[in-house]
Structure formats: C-alpha cells, structure tokens
Image (tube, rainbow, N blue to C red):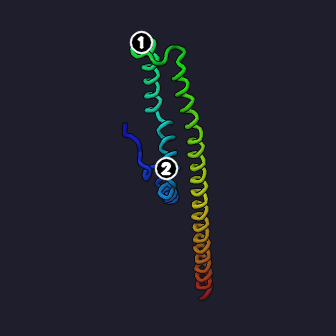
Amino acid sequence: MQGYRTAVTRFRHPVNVALQTNAPLGVRIANAVTGFMGSWRFIILQTLLVVAWVAGNIYELFHFDPYPFIFLNLAFSTQAAYAAPLILLASNQAAVRDRATLEHAAEEADDADKKDSEILTRLERIEGALTELAGKP
C-alpha cells in the first residue's frame, strides 16, 4: 500500500492547492479527520477495537462494561456526534473547492476561446491576402 497522499499531491490543481494551503485550521483538521474516518484503516481499526472490547468484557479479561455494553454505546454516540459536523464541514469545503475549480476552468475556457478567435481572424486575413495575390496576374 502506498499510504496516504499529501494534501499537495491530492489537490494538484493550483486553485485546490491555494484553497488547501489557505484553509483555516478547523477546516484542515476536519479534512484530515474525515479522510481518516473514511478509510479502510479506520474501519479495520474500529472493528478490531470493538471485537477486543466485547471479547474482553464477555470473557472478563477486563470487566468495566458488562453486557449490554452501555459504555461502548456511549462511545459510539459520542463518535457520531463529533463525526457528523466534521463530515458536513469537510463536505462544505469540498463544495467550495469544486466551485473554485469550475470557475477557474471556465476562465481558462474563455481565454482559449478568445485565443481561438484571434487565430481565426488572423487566418481570415492571411486567406484574404492570399486570395488577393492569387487574383493578380
């Protein structure tokens, strides 16, 4: 496995790099947390933790949260209470990033259209000049 890509390689477009670099600390933390929580590494780690928690309490290796595992439910509720706003914050940042990228792409397309129009105008002038030259004996 290659590991996680850094923010700079993940957001290669200049607009995305600028948005990531200039993002407030809270947004960068939200992106990092949601990036980890949405990974297989997190799912596997959490699954192993839950299995160890349940097995440890059932077989009384440690017996601080007996069945029906109220403390485990509290931990999951707390995790969900923090995860939901972080996910929304990261989602909002992604929408801002997408909008900025689209605006930048539209500007580049407008510039390309302008250059294409200039080239066509020059070609028409050249074509007109060649037609004039061809018409003269």
Farthest residue in the top direction?
A: 59
- Judge the density around disc 1: few (<14), some (14-19), many (≥20) Cα neighbours within 10 Å: few
Quarter of the image for residue 121 reads bottom right
Q: Tell me the kind of residue under disc 1.
A: Glu
Q: Nearer the viewer, residue 96 or 76?
A: 76
The residue positioned 49% from the left and 54% from the top of the image is: 20
**Residue named by callout 1:** 60
Q: How far across and how far down the image is residue 112, in percent?
A: 57, 67
The residue positioned 57% from the left and 61% from the top of the image is: 104
Q: Nearer the viewer, residue 61 or 38?
A: 61
Q: Quadrant of the C terminus?
A: bottom right
Q: Quadrant of the N terminus?
A: top left
Numbered disc 2: secondary structure: helix
Q: Nearer the viewer, residue 97 or 61?
A: 61
Farthest residue in the left direction?
A: 2
**Residue named by callout 2:** 28
The residue positioned 61% from the left and 55% from the top of the image is: 99
The residue positioned 47% from the left and 57% from the top of the image is: 21
Q: How far across and how far down the image is residue 131, in percent?
A: 61, 81
Quarter of the image for residue 70 reads top right
Q: Which label sits on residue 128?
A: none
Q: Tell me the kind of residue under disc 2.
A: Arg
Q: How far across and how far down the image is residue 15, in percent?
A: 52, 59
